[in-house]
Image: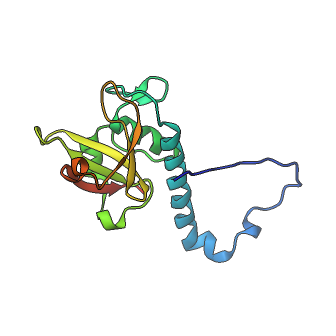
């Protein structure tokens, strides 16, 4: 999935923004519109992070990212604050069933040897997610339905 966002500027006479929004959108629909835009922003920054190096404790593209740092960074770009660690992200997010995953929701996995360690990725649709897999590797896509990830999957959460 490619998410493209474009912005343009034009030298037009300023007009009132509100007069161009249908009444329904200024009330109940505006929250859905905001969340939709935030999902797109998170997805775009996740895609832009592909190929960046894994860095334990990293939370910026300049220094590298770990799995939870990727989540912090992409959500921050969409003005959403999430906890720093994967376990805290799992404990504090809104529960989402695997059947109801949407782009930018979080998918969590456990370490088979140590149930205290969690791993997190950002769901991108079509059964795929982006994550920072570990030392010596780069941020990449994976599929949820591979045996490796299915056996370790523990749940999904959203901050949207």
Q: Residue at x 42, y 59 (%)?
A: 126
Q: Position of residue 130 (x, y in %)?
A: 40, 44
**Residue 63, quarter of picture:** top left
Residue occupying image coordinates x 33% and y 24%: 136
Q: Out of 97 and 87, give the one closest to the viewer.
A: 97
| Coordinates of residue 7 in the picture (x, y in percent) | 71, 48
Q: Nearer the viewer, residue 149 or 23?
A: 149
Q: Position of residue 131 (x, y in %)?
A: 37, 41
Q: Is residue 123 left or right of residue 145?
A: right
Q: Is residue 85 left or right of residue 151?
A: right
The mark total stands at 0
Q: Does residue 109 lie above or below 26 as drawn?
A: above
From the viewer's perspective, is 98 left or right of 72? left
Figure quadrant of residue 100: bottom left
Which percent across, then down, holds residue 110?
19, 45
Answer with left or right where residue 114 lies relative to residue 154: left
């Amino acid at each position: 999935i490619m998410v493209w966002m474009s912005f343009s500027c034009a030298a037009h006479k300023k007009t009132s923004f509100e007069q161009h929004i249908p009444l329904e959108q200024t009330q109940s629909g505006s929250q859905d519109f905001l969340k939709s835009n935030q999902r797109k922003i998170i997805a775009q920054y996740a895609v832009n992070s592909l190929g960046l190096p894994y860095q334990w404790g990293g939370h910026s593209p300049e220094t590298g990212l770990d799995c939870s740092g990727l989540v912090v960074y992409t959500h921050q770009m969409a003005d959403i604050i999430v906890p720093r660690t994967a376990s805290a992200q799992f404990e504090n997010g809104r529960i989402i069933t695997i059947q109801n995953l949407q782009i930018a929701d979080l998918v969590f996995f456990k370490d088979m040897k140590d149930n205290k360690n969690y791993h997190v990725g950002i769901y991108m649709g079509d059964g795929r997610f982006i994550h920072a897999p570990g030392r010596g590797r780069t941020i990449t896509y994976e599929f949820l339905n591979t045996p490796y990830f299915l056996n370790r999957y523990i749940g999904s959460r959203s901050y949207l």
